[in-house]
Image (cartoon, helix red, strand yellow):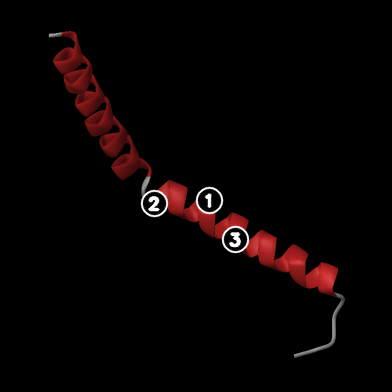
Amino acid sequence: MPQMAPSLWLLIYFFMCFMILLFMNKLFFIKKTVHKLEENKKLKVSKNFTWQ
């Protein structure tokens, strides 16, 4: 490994994490939307349950 400044390593690390997060969001976007819809349904059911 070549000797580099710690700030440069931090920049590379954050850049890699950011790219991974972007790819994960693109890959699992549909799954996340389905999960959010399911959570909304559960929240609505719980709200109806509290209103009764």
Q: Residues within 10 Å of mark 2 (few under 14, many from 20)?
A: few
Residue type highlighted by circle 1: Leu
Residue at the spot x=62%, y=64% of the render? 16
**Residue topped by disc 3:** 17
Q: Which mark is residue 22?
A: 1
Choose between 19 and 44: the one closer to the eye.
44
Left or right, 38 with reference to 15: left
- Element under disc 3: helix
Which is closer to the viewer, label 1 or label 3?
Answer: 3
Q: Quadrant of residue 10?
A: bottom right
Among all residues in the image, which is located at the extreme right?
5
Few, some or many C-alpha atoms within 10 Å of disc 3 (few <14, some 14-19, many ≥20)? few
Q: Secondary structure at mark 1?
A: helix
Q: Quadrant of residue 34?
A: top left
Q: Is residue 32 left or right of residue 22?
A: left
In the rendered image, residue 46, in percent from the top left (x then y), is placed at: 20, 22
| Residue sitting at x 27%, y 25% | 40
* Residue 27: assigned label: 2
Q: Nearer the viewer, residue 35 or 20?
A: 35
Along the line of sight, the residue nearer the viewer: 30 or 47: 47
49 w.r.t. 1: above or below? above
Q: Earlier in the sequence, mark 1 or mark 3?
A: 3
In percent of width and height, residue 1 lies at 75, 90
As measured in the structure, the alpha-carbon distance from the residue carrying label 1 to the one carrying label 2 is 9 Å
Among numbered discs 2 and 3, the one appearing first in the sequence? 3
Distance (Cα) linking label 2 and label 3? 15 Å
Say which element carries label 2. helix
User: Mark 1: few, some, or many residues within 10 Å (few <14, many ≥20)?
Assistant: few
Q: Nearer the viewer, residue 45 or 32?
A: 45
In percent of width and height, residue 17 lies at 60, 60
